[in-house]
Image (spheres, rainbow, N blue to C red):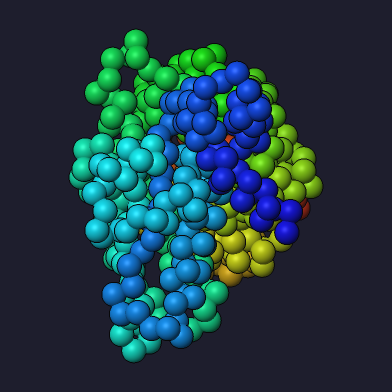
Amino acid sequence: TVKIHVTGILRNLNVSNRTEAVYAYRQMLDEDAPENPLTKQVRMVDRIGRPSIAVLPFEDLQPAPDRDHLLDGIMEELLVRLSSWQWFPVIAYASSRTFSSTESDPKVVGEHLNARYLICGSLRRQDDLVRVTVRLVDSVAGLDVWSHAFEATLGNLFDLQEEIARNIVTAMAPELLGAEEAGVLSRQRADYTTWDYCCRGFWHLNRTNREDLDKALNYFDLATQTDPDFGLGWHGRVSTLQLSLYEQWCDDPRQTVADLHAAARRCLEADARSSHAHADMGLANILLGKRDEAISHLEKSVGINPSSARALNLLAQAYGMAGRLDECIMQLEELLKVDPHSASAYRYRTILGMCHFVRGDYEASLAACREAISFREDATGAYLAMIASLEAMGDHESAVAAVSRLREAAPDFKLQGRLMMMQPFTEKRLLERLLTHLAAAGLTE
């Protein structure tokens, strides 16, 4: 109940975290300020530089009095998930519900609500099938940024509403960020806001090479210097350092872990109710070997935003490394529903392969690892689980061949670097079993 009320307060203030809420409230108490509360909220958002999103009422193309609650439930679930994402301020539905998804002029609506992006849609039903069509509109340009149709079968009403809203947010998120990143690339750097620095940082981070990694870190540092209380800059710093560790691009892994933990702590201080802040602290605690703290933060992260693929991924890893395999596999199954076509899908299958190895289901492990490698040839973690599974099955020749393939695919791979990340958190007996089979296949360094 408390979470529902807090979410409602943040939504009505047109903010996404407690720091912004305090700023907006103080502005509203300022009797000398000539602006009305809405104008003050807009000014607060402009300080950060992020555009706002408004969700317009979806049109029911086949209205039925006994099923009006279906569309209402989808709208409510969609607003909650967008608010939980927290990267963009979401206009209160009480303000946006007076406009129509199909009849209103996007430019007029955008100006009235001070919303750069509008989410519009319609719902159609045929027998037991529900089809929801969604459009993401740039109100300034008056153009559709993205559109998609989602289908689901009528069944449990709550599950249906959750599934549709989750699919919308998951599919729309990268398109929305991509549109913002493209806009930032066209602006002069002298005009960059904190939000622009973050967008530019994520653009370089998503290119996943060492040169762009350094540029991403530079932009996130500029974001944290411009506004130390905006958590997204710290989150970007954590994500960059995480990739540096994973790809073994850092010269001093221990110092990188310490820097990552410091950035995660600052992100959480900036917004203690942010899903990505708790995910960052979960990651930091994984690397520091603090098992209970890691799982606690990651469970909070997933609780705040069940659509966060990153939080689900980290929680699955934490469960798996702690030997809680059933819970790990359950999270992975949910993750593959939320993010089935992501560029990170190979990592999800890598974790699944390692879980099956630990369980002793070597055939299932090999299947998951081969699928991961088919997505990305240098998926080093998948090779480790594959080599260990082949050796455990007694297929020494194939295990040795897999070691050679690993060396070819990732010539700079260092086993000790990977162990440094796994050792603090992984159950000792599980790690020893893995290392025994890897050594038998000739992989020791």
Q: Quadrant of residue 415?
A: top right
Residue 326 seen by the camera:
yes
In the image, taking residue 384 as reference, residue 212 lies left or right, namely left
Q: Quadrant of residue 326?
A: bottom right
- Taking depth in this image into account, of 10 and 172 the one nearest to the observer is 10
Residue 261 seen by the camera:
no
In the image, taking residue 427 as reference, residue 90 lies left or right, namely left
- Taking depth in this image into account, of 442 and 430 the one nearest to the observer is 430
Residue at left offset 37%, top offset 21%? 211
Q: At which x and y percent is residue 103?
A: 24, 58
| Residue farthest along the top direction in this orientation | 190
Count of marks overlaid on the render: 0
In the image, taking residue 325 as reference, residue 165 lies left or right, namely left
| Residue farthest along the bottom direction in this orientation | 127
Q: At which x and y percent is residue 114?
A: 38, 37
Q: Quadrant of residue 340?
A: bottom left
Residue at left offset 49%, top offset 22%? 47
Q: At which x and y percent is residue 177?
A: 37, 39
Q: At which x and y percent is residue 250?
A: 52, 22
Residue at left offset 66%, top offset 42%? 273
Q: Is residue 9 above or below residue 63?
A: above
Residue at left offset 46%, top offset 63%? 75
Query: Where, quadrant-wise, is the C terminus in this rendering?
Result: top right
